[in-house]
Amino acid sequence: MPSYSEPVPSLDQLMRSPARAVPVTVLLIALNILLFLLMARLSLSPWSLTHADPLAWGANFGPATQDGQWWRLLSAVFVHFSFIHIAFNMWALWDVGRLLERLLGRWRYALLYLGTGAAGNLLSLAVQGNEKITGGASGAIFGLYGALIVFLWRERRQVDPAEFRWLFTVAVGFSAVMLGLGFFIPAIDNAAHGGGLLAGALLGSLLARPWKPGSPLAREQAPWAGAVSIIGLLALMASISPPLYRYQEELRARAAIQRFDAEEQARWDTLLRADDRAALSFDQGTGALEQEIAASYRHSFEELAAVRPATPVPSKDALLKLESYAASRSQAARTLAEGLRACANPASTGPAHASGRPEECQTTANQTPASRRHSIRTPAAPSRGDPAP
């Protein structure tokens, strides 16, 4: 709360506040930069974080956020996708954040920043939740500009006329230009920007405090701002479309596919290593074929079937193909083992083979396990692309 016994600093002076006077702004910038650096470690280039999964770091996306992960409305405020993205946002935050932190105080300012950022992401979710992965501090920054515009208009008689014209023109002009660019640049999340701006105007009215002794009472604006905020929030929640799929189902499908890929080579390597350690008898070889291969494929089939998604996740087709593949390989391995046993025991196949083994069975029986290993090839799994998020 400003002390009226001392001269109230001008808005220009507040905008030039040193870092020690605006700890919340400094902390917010530090958190954004720290998260960006952690994400950049996973990418080949910090200019574009192509190898860092933004969803893993908390970005906003309908199938994930609406799958019980509503905390993404806040975490997405700290997720940026490129160096230019974060550099521009942090410059804007440092420029307008110092002024708002000094005007509102630390706690009100922090609440304004986080609240408008979440509100912007909520509107983005309603507009394009199933289409784009979104993130960035710009929604919260637009919220700061929305609160600044309301403050300047409310305090227009307390602000120096030249300072009012300059700051009001810059705040309104910046907001208008950036919103206008959003209609021409698809990468800009205009919904988050517009939502943050409107939320900033409303929250700024609720959180406002008198600036000078002659300032109008902020509480006169609080009732209507609170009512509009509640009505707007309820309407926004009601307008959000159901997600196309559940992100947790997609993650389980991906994990099952990765386990299958790892097991695919391991199951054959296990059999072949056992073949190298000791010469297996014919019965031992066919038994290993059933136990190591057929049973393993059956287990993989059961694991894949257990995570079969109920919604059309991006990895569903690949999962179903692998499920069918595992079932067919399990049956093929079991059929092969039974056929080899039939060749090794012609009496069990009936009178037709009583006089001896067929030529193909004789050839198979004369092969040692070591010679047969070179004819074994790991079956190729169905072709599939990387599942989209």
Image: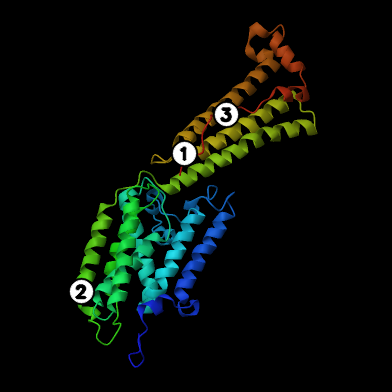
> Are circles 1 and 3 on residues that touch, CB within 8 Å?
no
Q: Nearer the viewer, residue 258 or 19?
A: 19
Q: Quadrant of residue 136?
A: bottom left
The tag on residue 223 is 2
Mark 2–mark 3 distance (CA, rounded to whole Å): 69 Å
Location of mark 1 (residue): 315
Residue pictured at 36% horizontal, 81% vertical = 10
- Report the quarter where the C terminus lies: top left
**Taking 362 as reference, is 109 left or right?**
left
Residue at figure coordinates x 59%, y 55% from the top left: 41
Residue type (three-letter) at the residue carrying disc 3 = Ser
Q: Which residue does the numbered mark 3 point to in the structure image?
A: 330
Image point 77% across, 25% down: which residue? 370
Going by the numbered disc 2, the residue's amino acid type is Pro
Compared across the picture, whether 327 is left or right of 103 comes to right
**In this rendering, is residue 147 above or below 383?**
below
